[in-house]
Image (spheres, rainbow, N blue to C red):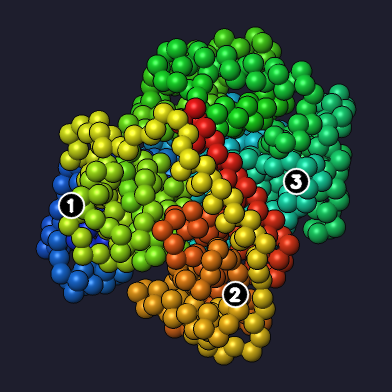
Amino acid sequence: MSASSTTGPGPRRLTSRQVSIIQMLTKTGAKPVTINAIAEKLGVSSRTVLREMPAIEAWFEENDFKFVRKPGVGLMIQEEPETIQLLQELLHTEQVKTTYSRKERRRQLLGELLCAKEPIKSYVFLSRFHISEGTLSNDLDALNDWLSDYGIKVIRRPGVGILLEGSESAYRQAIANAAFEFMDEGEILQLLRGQKEEPSPSSSTLLQDRLFSFIDPQIVTFVERVLAESEKQLDIKFTDSGYMALVVHLSLAIRRLQSGETIEMDADELAELAALPEHGAAVQIAEKISAQFKLDIPKEEVGFITMHLSSARIWPQSRKPRSQVQSINTRQVVMSLVDSVEEEIGLPFHTCTRMIEELMSHMDSMISRLSLNLHLDNAQVEDIQQNYPDIYAAVERACGIFKDLLQINDISPSEITFVAMHFVAAAETLRVEQKRVAVAVVCPSGMGASRMLAANLMRSFHNIEIRQIVSAFSLEPNALREAGIDLVISTVPLQLDFPNICVSPIPQAQDMLVITNAVEAINKDRKDNAEAQKALPQRADTVTLADIRSLTRTGEEISQLLDHFTLREVPGLQRAEELLGEAAGLFANTVLERQRIGSDLARREQVKSTYLPHMSIYLLHCRTAAVSHCRFGYLRLDHTILTHSGTVMGAVLLLAPKTDWPEGVEVISRLSMLLVEDERFLQALQAGDQDRGKALAEQALVKYYATELKRIGDGKL
């Protein structure tokens, strides 16, 4: 809802969204924040944020704060920290508007009508929302159009009131889909999580709506538990969207059952549902609901649960429980779809293997959902149609091609948008391939914190190419330029005549903004993407003896590391600093070796602490002459230690030999990356499960060796 100036005297009042935007700006100070970054944080479109800007700018002007809006750069508050503190205090006392936008008003109307047991007088709505009878009539017309898709009618009876008419099944589908239409996925997730995070003003308002009264934290916790058990029973994995829809539908079903409302189904439909593989899991879920909430669950409700389990499932690719014919047909449909869209858009979608696999899984769920006459609304329809009209149109035409093949009468804009979103994501990836920023990631040793940072960057930024991971002591501006590096991202402050920024090994929200701004600035300033590729090192045409020796050293280091993979419990420590001494002795054979490892670890720790608060561990690492091959270990405390930085549960130890060969550092760095990429690895270490930890390490290192072998083969043979 956009703000407008208040009529009459008095200060301007902000909406909750405007307050949230200003609060974000106060946290970044003089550093610009892009519209896109704000939109992503709030879970809204960029256009929505832009609509709020005139009111925000006017508020800043009224309160004598300097607000700067630079096209192509971002938004920022140009004030001293003391002044920004005053601004934050002013926001804290700001009175937020309680007026309703048309969408919010209609949401409230819909909630009241769907939950009402008897007609509601029109004056109730007229007085609550301060609207005219004409406005109420228009709202009810709009709601009637929306509800008609579910077979529900808005009945207006003079002298009696307003009520809805429809089946219980229609009511449930309307309420569930209203949740997805009137809320962003982030808001839904926040409500389902029982407001564990600090709620936004908008989500607090949503919780108070009768429309969402079925979202009870205790019910949601119960539903999530039984769904996790269902995944194991059916040997499946739900998609994120399918899982969220299931939680909503089942939570709603429990609440409606508690209110005495039950589903009706005919015998033929129940028989079809009983034949599905999900029916057994649905029976067990119904039994658990009955026991937990002391409810009688009729067979129609079991059918209802079966229907939604079936529509949300996704089978693991490795198991392939579907018949070969079904699998081939699905793939044929998807590949026909890909070919059709690719021909219109002109992008090589057939190269996007991950998109194709995800689209196959989505198509299975979509076909099942449509065959059961289930409707799933998509709040992104308008955004996709407006921002990607070419892709939406191409997908719409392609979907029309196989409607007959799938025996589906109609495919709604919501379903077309779900499919289009896969192509949009792939298109963005393909289009930014030519706009990637070449990055060198740096930490003091080039092996521990930098590898962890690199893993986080690769996971969070698709427009960044990690071209080098190096030690801070090895940096040389001319060498960086020759390698085509655009930006150095370091875990420690650098005095370097080259574009560079300093962030945490596990970047926080502020770090993400710093990185985003730096990348956007580089893309803006670059005149020609080809210039960044000119200095790329050229590969030889044939495999050389040096390649063979490098692969041999890599294999030897992997073998040595796994042979000496060690987990050790360290009892009785009182201070976290004592971990360094324990680590020094883990792989030392003599007193001299222990002293040397301890000295090398301490020297690295003095540069910057290797404590990782999000993992509650130290990442102790160094190069040292005390070992001739790579070593990996984990020191597990028998109790957590509380420090000024946070709790400490143990320490990972990474040792690389001090040689001129890079293979040792490369091998051992793969395990620091594994800590970020696979949470199971750290869980195994902290649980003291050496066999599990070693198995995961072996899997990652063998994969790395195979990649190196393929890289040399593909590049030189």
Q: Alpha carbon of mark 3 to alpha carbon of mark 2: how far? A: 43 Å
**Residue 509 shows in this picture:** no
For disc 3, the marked residue is 231
**Residue 136 shows in this picture:** yes
For disc 1, the marked residue is 57
Q: What's the amino acid at mark 1?
A: Glu
The crowding category of the residue bearing disc 3, from other C-alpha atoms within 10 Å (few below 14, some 14 to 19, many at least 20), is some
For disc 2, the marked residue is 587
Q: Alpha carbon of mark 1 to alpha carbon of mark 3: how far? A: 50 Å
Q: Nearer the viewer, mark 1 or mark 3?
A: 3
State the residue at coordinates (36%, 49%): 468
Q: Looking at the picture, does residue 175 appear above or below residue 194?
A: above
**Quarter assignment of residue 63:** bottom left
Asked whether, in this view, residue 225 is left or right of residue 114, the answer is right
Label 2: state its secondary structure. Answer: loop
Q: Nearer the viewer, residue 350 or 579?
A: 579
